[in-house]
Image (tube, rainbow, N blue to C red):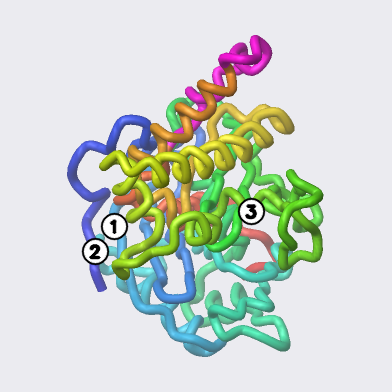
């Protein structure tokens, strides 16, 4: 387990969210909460103080299958609490973000293939709650990432925020926080990756053609610039573009334009104050942020309407040194659902 007694040191890069934020004073009477971000390879934990600061972090390898997922989750909670010299009984609640289909009211997860959860839904909230004797709430990993990003965003301590967390990974999707509340809909909120942008484009696994995720996801970078050195394709592409390779420069611009289109879609549909770039591609950091902001600025030059919306200024990076989704899950745990304990 790797850990720290607070956010990692160092100043975040320009355009990145700060590493921790304070909650409004009305929320400071609560006890600490723990948030978990359970992924296919790792489980991240964050202990959130009543004032909203991150007290400790932990990381464990995820074990596949229902029993393994629950066991690692329990160990992660116990470990991160122990770092702060506390006991699990001192917690106000536990929040969990997971991939797959989440029954938010029931606290269940199903069809999480990367976790080895198939067939019958796993009653994750009930099983983890029974193991630790603490209330547990479970949500989709993108939703808790959006909550975490909203918690860390500028101005979060003074007003409810409208924010989108845009995940640039194998696919493309967004978690939405509107007026400080997660927008879930019937389960498809934020699935902008499956909005067709070219009806004559290549087929998408969803059954449509020319979907946005074919152009703006991490997988899209793999197609634009196949990796040759064993490193991630986005790293190779942006390094080659920085070195002046004309083919790489063109490919980088194509990709940045596609991500800018996703940002534009989010701003024009729900007028979010911030769009936070996350996911694997966002680990590029400032070079990605600069490229996307430049693409938005170019597009605004031709449109007074777009220029008036200052979209480039709305785009931020998720901090790479803070487990944003785990922080969001800890925020979610402040209001556990009755069916999720």
Residue under label 3, please give it.
213
Work out whether residue 156 or residue 126 is closer to the camera in this orientation and state it: 156
Residue at screen point 64% across, 70% down: 100
Mark 2 → mark 3, Cα distance in angstroms: 34 Å
Residue 75, horizontal then vertical, whole percent: 37, 78
Residue 260, horizontal then vertical, whole percent: 56, 35
User: Which mark, residue 3?
Assistant: 2
Residue under label 1, please give it.
56
When the figure is inspected, residue 292 is found, relative to residue 80, above or below; the finding is above
- The question of residue 310 being in magenta is answered with yes
Residue at screen point 62% across, 61% down: 139
The disc, 2 or 1, on the residue closer to the chain's N-terminal end is 2
Label 3: how many Cα within 10 Å (few below 14, some 14–19, many 20+): many
Count of labels in the image: 3
Residue 172, horizontal then vertical, whole percent: 60, 54
The disc, 1 or 3, on the residue closer to the chain's N-terminal end is 1
The residue segment tinted magenta is 301-316
Q: Secondary structure at mark 1?
A: strand
Residue at screen point 62% across, 77% down: 112
When the figure is inspected, residue 3 is found, relative to residue 111, above or below; the finding is above
Instruction: Quadrant for residue 170, please give it.
Output: bottom right
Which circle, 2 or 3, is nearer the viewer?
3
Left or right: where 142 falls relative to 47:
right
């Amino acid at each position: 387990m790797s850990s720290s007694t607070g956010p990692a040191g160092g100043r975040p890069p320009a355009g990145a969210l700060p590493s921790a934020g304070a909650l409004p004073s009305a929320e400071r009477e609560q006890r600490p909460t723990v948030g978990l971000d359970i992924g296919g390879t790792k489980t991240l934990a964050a202990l959130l103080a009543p004032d909203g600061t991150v007290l400790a972090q932990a990381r464990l390898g995820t074990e596949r299958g229902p029993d393994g997922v629950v066991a690692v989750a329990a160990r992660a909670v116990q470990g991160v609490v122990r770092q702060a010299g506390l006991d699990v009984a001192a917690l106000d609640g536990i929040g969990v973000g997971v991939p797959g289909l989440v029954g938010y009211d029931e606290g269940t997860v199903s069809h999480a293939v990367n976790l080895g959860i198939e067939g019958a839904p796993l009653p994750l909230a009930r099983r983890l709650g029974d193991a630790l004797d603490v209330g547990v709430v479970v949500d989709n990993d993108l939703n808790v990432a959006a909550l975490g990003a909203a918690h860390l965003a500028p101005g979060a301590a003074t007003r409810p925020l409208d924010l989108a967390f845009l995940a640039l990974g194998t696919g493309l999707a967004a978690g939405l926080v509107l007026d400080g509340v997660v927008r879930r809909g019937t389960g498809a909120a934020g699935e902008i990756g499956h909005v067709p942008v070219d009806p004559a484009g290549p087929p998408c696994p969803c059954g449509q053609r020319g979907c946005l995720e074919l152009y703006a996801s991490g997988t899209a970078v793999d197609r634009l610039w196949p990796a040759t050195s064993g490193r991630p394709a986005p790293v190779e592409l942006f390094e080659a573009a920085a070195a002046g390779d004309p083919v790489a420069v063109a490919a980088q611009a194509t990709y940045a334009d596609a991500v800018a289109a996703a940002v534009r879609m989010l701003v024009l549909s729900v007028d979010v104050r911030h769009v936070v770039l996350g996911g694997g591609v966002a680990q590029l950091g400032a070079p990605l942020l600069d490229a996307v902001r430049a693409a938005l600025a170019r597009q605004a030059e031709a449109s007074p309407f777009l220029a008036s919306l200052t979209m480039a200024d709305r785009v931020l990076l998720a901090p790479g040194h803070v487990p944003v989704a785990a922080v969001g899950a800890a925020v979610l745990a402040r209001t556990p659902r009755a069916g999720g304990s």
